[in-house]
Image (tube, grey):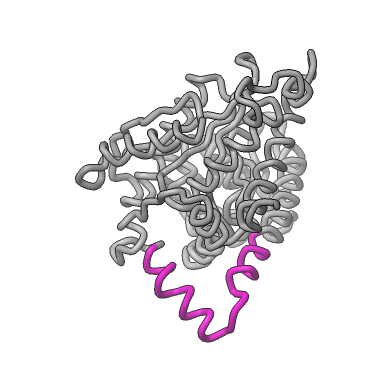
Amino acid sequence: MGPHPAVAAIRLAVRRVLHDILNTLPTSGERPDRLAERFPSPLGSVLVAPPESPLVLVACSGGADSMALASALAFEAPRLGLRAGGITVDHGLQPGSDLRADEVALRMRGLGLDPVESVSVDVGRDGGPEAAARDARYAALDAALDRHGAAAVLLGHTRDDQAETVLLGLARGSGIRSLSGMAAVSGAGGRYRRPFLHLDRQTARKACMVQSLPVWDDPHNTDPAYTRSRLRHEGLPALEKALGKGVVEALARTAQLSRDDADALDSWASQAEASVRDAAGLLECAKLYALPPAVRRRILRRAAIEAGAPAGSLFARHIEEVDRLITGWRGQGAINLPGRVVAQRQGGRLVIRQG
């Protein structure tokens, strides 16, 4: 008899991602998934990847989504000749968080993951508590990936998380890239992978239940002080009540369609940028004006970031102000951007530099 449907679904999702990772690895020598067939474990049915095999990590908070992901990685990785490890991040935001992180690490070791780390971080204040915690967490994951020489880190974001991200982007009014939500593959060299973006949160929770995996429900996820928590427990249920079931699926589908469109526009802007610069590399206003607004604003945003404006602090309203130097020129003065960057029009050229 096969595994429970929920367990089968999460394992299949992880297996597909691991195959993708294998296909991105250097092709010299024999593929790890072929080697796995030659190295069965002396324990019998449990497979163990060779010690020189590539390593894939899972980021695990102890919640249902990441515990389901950890269990699926522990099952699938050795069958493909990959080593599986885990990392849990202690944000230090709740009493006893260090003990809880140690417990999560112990659970991951119990699943057979190795190496396993519990890492403590200092959460700053920039961008609000949620953004600051996220920045600290990803910095820790980047460091762990580099420290262990891992091929990738798996993240347990689900379709529900994707729907919430799309709604948060819609509320910010920050454009189609924001509506595209989280990418299945992101980070330098594709180091972050999200296998569960097409699975709902209940599937992961069910998979944990039928495997008797203990899970920890973060109280921050139900704390109305946090925007995402309010959206999860008030906003989305209200939308489903007003619009009917299927809102989460529709939002996740919107994310994928938006990402496809945003990728195409980014590519267009990248190709067009060289054609709107003069011999000195300055942006020519007349040539920028002739471009479609979506393409032009992407070029302006990229130029602002290259000049030193922090991407996370550069909002749509900033780019709109710079865009008016092109489309609504009335002799206005310089535009101040985050990161002490200044944009101004001079002699038909747009100059964006540190002020």
Say left or right for 63 vs 92: right
Query: Magenta includes 237?
Result: yes
Q: Residue at x 72, y 23 (%)?
A: 36
Seen from this angle, which residue lies furthest left?
95
Residue 63 lies, with reference to residue 70, above or below; the image says below
Quadrant in the rendering for residue 176: bottom right
- Where residue 334 appears, x then y in whole percent? 45, 48
Say left or right for 14 vs 106: right
Q: Residue at x 38, y 64 (%)?
A: 229
Q: Residue at x 52, y 36 (%)?
A: 58
Inspect this view and state whether residue 307 appears: yes
- Where residue 82 appears, x then y in whole percent? 65, 26
**Residue stretch in magenta:** 229-255
- Where residue 269 appears, x then y in whole percent? 72, 46
Q: Residue at x 75, y 51 (%)?
A: 264
In depth, the one of 266 and 322 nearer the eye is: 266
In depth, the one of 288 and 18 nearer the eye is: 18
Query: Magenta includes 5?
Result: no
Seen from this angle, which residue lies furthest bottom?
242
Image quarter (top left, top right, bottom left or bottom right) of the C terminus: top left
What secondary structure do most residues of the magenta stretch adopt? helix
Say left or right for 254 vs 140: right
Inspect this view and state whether residue 296 appears: no
Q: Number of labelled discs?
A: 0
Residue 6 lies, with reference to residue 123, above or below; the image says below
In depth, the one of 96 and 165 nearer the eye is: 96
In depth, the one of 344 and 53 nearer the eye is: 53
- Where residue 49 appears, x then y in whole percent? 64, 22
Residue 98 lies, with reference to residue 337, above or below; the image says above
